Image: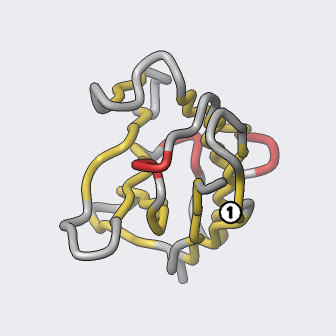
Amino acid sequence: QVQLVESGGGLVQPGGSLRLSCAASGSAVSISAMGWYRQAPGKQRELVATITSSGTTNYADSVKGRFTISRENAKNMMYLQMNSLKPEDTAVYYCNQFYNNMLYWGKGTLVTVSS
């Protein structure tokens, strides 16, 4: 059974940094396409960043140059390094994984950017 668990969210001031983690069990991140999405209050869930099994990355325009997606195959983990955070980055952040022709989601971690 595939399970994804996000962690690392919290309250941070504008301009600050956070690193989100996504721990995968029951699947292998090394052979999966994975991604980070976010959903702000009253808004639809939107793509933040993705990484393919070959390591190709893709970012939403709003986070390019500030966020970095990565994974650590040996630990079966995926990360999202978020720098220069802005109030508009406030949202619940979700990781997902496309594995064995199915899409799995974690339950999310809340990031609040506020002074």
4 relative position to 23: left or right:
left
Reading the image, the residue beneath label 1 is: 9
- Farthest residue, direction left: 44
User: Quarter of the image holding residue 40?
Assistant: bottom left
Quarter of the view holding residue 114: bottom right
Whether residue 79 sits left or right of residue 1 in the image: it is right
Q: Nearer the viewer, residue 80 or 51?
A: 80
Judged left or right of residue 26, residue 33 is left
Quadrant where the C terminus is found in the figure: bottom right
Q: Looking at the image, which residue sits at the far front? A: 115
| Closer-to-camera residue (22/86) | 86
Residue at left 31%, top 66%? 103
Image position of 95 with respect to 1: above or below: above
Give residue 64's position: percent from left, percent from top.
Answer: 40, 21
Residue 57: % across, % down: 41, 24
* Residue 44 position within the rendered picture, expressed as x and y whole percent measured from the top left: 19, 67
